[in-house]
Amino acid sequence: MKKTICFIAFTMLLSAAWNNDVTAREKKTKAPADNTLTKKEKSQGWKLLFDGKTADAWMNPRTGNFPTGGWLIENGVMKITPGSDGGDIVTKEKFRNFELVMDFNYTPGANSGIKYFVDTETNGGKLSGIGCEYQVLDDRLHPDAKAGKNGNRTLSSLYDLIPAKNVTDNGANQWNQAKIVVQGNKIQHWLNGKLTVEYERGNDSWKEAVAGSKFKTSPGFGEVKEGRILLQDHGNEVLYKNMKIRILE
């Protein structure tokens, strides 16, 4: 009897220790809350472009204020409403060398984009909607996926210039993660952890790509040293969250 009791007690102790270990590991691997930074990210220089509640980092490029309509903030996401007149929004701050990460969720057939090196001042703001664009698109349903050249208007492509490769798309109504890395003239696009586009501004390949694109009539396209980040209003519902950036040397 004593041996049985001791065995049961020992088994219970092992079970408790196992459960405690599992709980500890779950806490360690638990994903951080949306629109927050971990201690490690803070130490690495990351900062939020959206806290899930306010749009303090963003503005309409023409008015200097965040749109009163068209863009909504609810349930921790910033989204464009269909058929709205909110217009594009840009960061109040300009960036030169950076790593930008954000999650996006497109609805069926939607079109949007994440632009960078956007110049909102030159020629009275006439270039405020132009910049290098990380394409956000439903490749399955939106006709733009079959436009352009060799798929250079598909998801994660450098819009109308360089087609994306190694694309792993989670699909409509699902969250995807975009990452853009800029180090001098060298730029990368990433989608869900995979490198999809890599290029260098200003070299012969870049100039050839621009000359064959819709931006051939925009002198110096994409070659400003620093610019704003832009989220495009293309009239479709697209959601964004976990937007963060860090400056690179």
Image (spheres, rainbow, N blue to C red):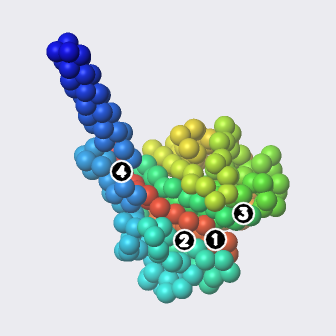
Which residue is disc 3 drawn over?
Answer: 108
Count of numbered circles on the image: 4
Q: For the view shown, which residue lies furthest in the front direction? A: 1
Give the amino acid type for the residue marked by disc 4 in the picture. Pro
Which residue is disc 2 drawn over?
Answer: 79
Q: Are marks 3 and 1 in contact (CB under 8 Å)?
A: no
Residue at point 56% right, 66% down? 239
Q: Which mark sits nearer the N-terminus, 4 or 2?
A: 4
Q: Which mark sits nearer the N-terminus, 4 or 3?
A: 4
Give the amino acid type for the residue marked by disc 1 in the picture. Glu
State left or right for residue 30 relative to residue 60. left
Q: Quadrant of the C terminus?
A: top left
| Residue 32: image tag | 4
Give the amino acid type for the residue marked by disc 3 in the picture. Pro
Residue nearest the observer in this picture, 211 or 111: 111
State left or right for residue 16 relative to residue 73. left
Disc 2 is placed on an element classified as strand
Q: Quadrant of residue 125?
A: bottom right
Q: Quadrant of residue 79?
A: bottom right
Which residue is disc 1 drawn over?
Answer: 237
Q: Distance between the Cα atoms at labels 4 and 2?
A: 21 Å
Q: Distance between the Cα atoms at labels 1 and 2?
A: 7 Å
Q: Are marks 4 and 3 in contact (CB under 8 Å)?
A: no
Disc 4 is placed on an element classified as loop
Q: Position of residue 81 (x, y in %)?
A: 61, 77
Q: Nearer the viewer, mark 4 or mark 2?
A: 4
**Any part of residue 209 in sight:** no
Q: Distance between the Cα atoms at labels 3 and 1?
A: 9 Å
Residue at point 34% right, 57% down? 36
Q: Quadrant of the N terminus?
A: top left
Q: Distance between the Cα atoms at labels 4 and 3?
A: 28 Å
